[in-house]
Image (cartoon, rainbow, N blue to C red):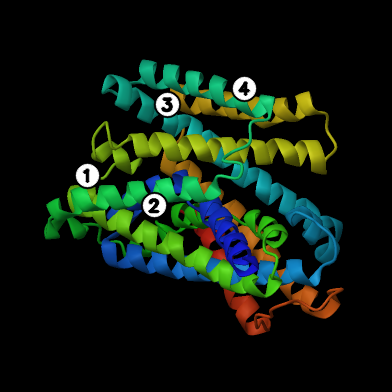
């Protein structure tokens, strides 16, 4: 019985990581890969996925080397000082504001399509406002995203992806897997930001530590939890691109019909709820701002920015998640690598697992994240 409970704890930890990673970001991957071409797109999909698993493993070791319970800004403060804490906080806020804004825009478009069969501006704007009102109210009232149902939520997402694959992949056409864009630089780098965004879930790792009783299994849980999204993203991307090719829209399920787009409604609903709660709690718990003001600081900027983007067509769903992924995710990745080096030397406890790092590996990872940030600004 004890063995079964320990296995359940590990499964729950894996589900927390996978559930944090697989969110609305999955909806943008087929579009960016369709534009870049399947070959270069899959190199990004698999390569970035493996890089992020390495970063998760470093973060897990950092957490195990540190006494007490902290979140990412707390670990950054311990190993990188006040400036590290501020940078990590900025990184998290950028990712979460970007995500909330993208979900506000995307959910309004998808709801308009599902209910009315159109994504025209008046209806897009109306459903975005309805969605925002509902979600901000749920977060204010303190409804927890999924709660202890991470395994159920994860199972639902996997079941939806498998169902979509079984129905649409047999209709794939080989010609849809080829791109016509001759720009090699574009084809290699364009998917980077959106794909990195889809893999971000750093804040789940501290929660995994609290759930897993046998801390030696944390390494295994991180690896499994990192591999599952790669597989799910691969299946979903192959299916959508095979079905629509270069005609794949920025929110992939719009290409699969109104009923299938309920998958997008579900993923953006759960993602918005989880990110909204996390954002509010950063202000409330970490920065010691009162509850009402924390809620206002979380949602009012998202509403104003989101409405401006929709009304004046300032940015697209893909542009927002690509910026958040490449810039904020890149900063977070760099900080975790630097923290891992410092924790190896100054950690206060012996970790249950160790993952090798040296200045060559650290420099390579930092260079990759820096190139992604630079590309986002330059191109």
Badge 1 is on which residue? 247
Number of other residues with Cα within 10 Å of mark 4, as a class: few under 14, some 14 to 19, many 20 or more: few
Report the residue marked by disc 4: 137
Instruction: Determine which residue is flagged by label 3.
Output: 108
Q: Earlier in the sequence, mark 4 or mark 1?
A: 4
For image coordinates 59% across by 40% down, the residue present is 274
Question: Tag 1, which secondary structure?
Answer: helix
CA–CA distance in space, label 4 to label 1 = 36 Å
Q: Is residue 189 visible?
A: yes
Answer yes or no: do the residues labelled 3 and 4 have beta carbons within 8 Å?
A: no
At 79% from the left edge and 74% from the top edge, which residue is drawn? 343
4 or 20: nearer the viewer: 4
Q: Is residue 374 above or below residue 248?
A: below
**Numbered mark located on residue 317 in the image:** none
Local packing at callout 1 (Cα closer than 10 Å; few below 14, some 14-19, many 20+) is some
Residue at x 83%, y 33% (from the top left corner): 289
Q: Picture quarter containing residue 200? A: bottom right
Q: CA distance from mark 2 to mark 1?
A: 25 Å
Image point (52%, 63%), residue name: 225
């Amino acid at each position: 019985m004890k063995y079964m409970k320990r296995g359940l704890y590990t499964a729950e930890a894996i589900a927390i990581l996978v559930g944090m990673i697989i969110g609305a970001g999955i909806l943008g991957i087929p579009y960016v890969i369709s534009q870049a071409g399947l070959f270069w797109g899959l190199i990004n999909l698999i390569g970035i996925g493996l890089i992020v698993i390495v970063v998760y493993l470093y973060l897990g070791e950092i957490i195990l080397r540190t006494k007490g319970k902290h979140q990412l800004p707390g670990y950054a403060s311990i190993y990188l000082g006040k400036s590290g804490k501020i940078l990590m906080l900025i990184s998290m806020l950028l990712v979460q504001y970007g995500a909330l804004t993208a979900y506000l825009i995307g959910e309004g478009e998808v709801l308009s399509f599902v209910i009315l069969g159109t994504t025209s501006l008046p209806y897009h704007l109306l459903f975005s406002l309805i969605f925002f009102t509902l979600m901000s109210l749920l977060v204010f009232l303190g409804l927890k995203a999924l709660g202890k149902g991470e395994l159920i939520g994860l199972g639902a997402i996997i079941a939806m992806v498998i169902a979509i694959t079984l129905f649409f992949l047999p209709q794939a056409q080989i010609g849809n897997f080829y791109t016509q864009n001759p720009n090699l630089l574009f084809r290699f780098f364009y998917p980077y930001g959106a794909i990195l965004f889809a893999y971000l879930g750093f804040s789940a790792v501290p929660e995994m530590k609290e759930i897993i009783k046998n801390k030696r299994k944390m390494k295994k849980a991180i690896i499994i939890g990192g591999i599952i999204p790669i597989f799910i993203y691969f299946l979903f991307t192959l299916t959508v691109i095979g079905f629509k090719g270069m005609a794949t829209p920025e929110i992939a399920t719009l290409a699969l019909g109104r009923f299938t787009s309920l998958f997008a409604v579900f993923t953006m609903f759960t993602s918005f709820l989880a990110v909204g709660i996390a954002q509010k709690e950063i202000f409330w718990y970490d920065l010691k701002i009162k509850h009402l003001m924390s809620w206002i600081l979380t949602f009012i900027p998202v509403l104003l920015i989101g409405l401006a983007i929709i009304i004046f067509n300032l940015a697209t769903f893909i542009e927002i998640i690509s910026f958040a992924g490449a810039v904020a995710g890149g900063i977070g990745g760099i900080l975790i690598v630097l923290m891992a080096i410092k924790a190896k030397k100054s950690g206060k406890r012996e970790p249950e697992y160790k993952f090798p790092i040296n200045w060559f590996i650290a420099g390579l990872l930092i260079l990759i994240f820096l190139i992604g940030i630079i590309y986002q600004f330059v191109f």
